[in-house]
Amino acid sequence: MRRLADQLEDAAVEQAMRAGWSWPQVSEALGVTRQAVHKKHAKRLIAAEVKLRRRGDERV
């Protein structure tokens, strides 16, 4: 079950980031710190060529 939960979280985080969510928004939805979600997901998202928002980026 843990593997399935991790896969679902990975997919949800990727979808949220592709939709323009910020790290703080994702972290709040998951109930963890921004640093924790970034550490867990950033490398995978970069490898998947997801454009990541940086602090101060404005949503268009």
Image (spheres, rainbow, N blue to C red):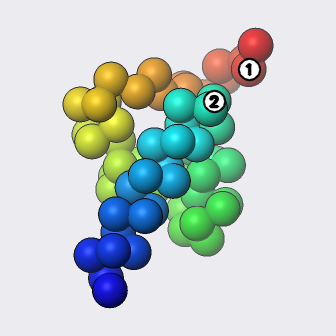
| Callout 2 secondary element | loop
**Which amino acid is tagged 2?**
Gly
Residue placed most toward the observer, 24 or 14:
14
What amino acid type is highlighted by mark number 1? Arg
Residue 30: image x %, image y %? 58, 66
Of the pair 7 and 20, the residue shown nearer to us: 7
Point 44% across, 62% down: residue: 9
Task: Tell which circle, 1 or 2, labels the residue nearer the N-terminal end.
Answer: 2
Mark 1 touches mark 2? (CB < 8 Å): yes
Looking at the rendered image, the quarter that the C terminus falls into is top right
* Residue that mark 2 sits on: 20
Dot 1: within a 10 Å radius of its alpha carbon, few (fewer than 14), some, or many (20 or more) residues? few
Q: Residues within 10 Å of mark 2 (few under 14, many from 20)?
A: some
Residue at point 27%, 42% (across, down): 44
Tell me if I can see residue 23 in this picture. yes
Q: Report which quarter residue 54 is drawn in.
A: top right
Residue that extends furthest to the top in the rendered view of this protein:
60
Classify mark 1: helix, strand or loop: loop
Q: Is residue 8 left or right of residue 19?
A: left
27 sits to left or right of 43: right
Tag 1 residue: 59
Q: Image check: 48 left or right of 35?
A: left
Residue 51: x and y, percent? 45, 22
| Label ID, residue 23 | none
What is the count of numbered marks?
A: 2
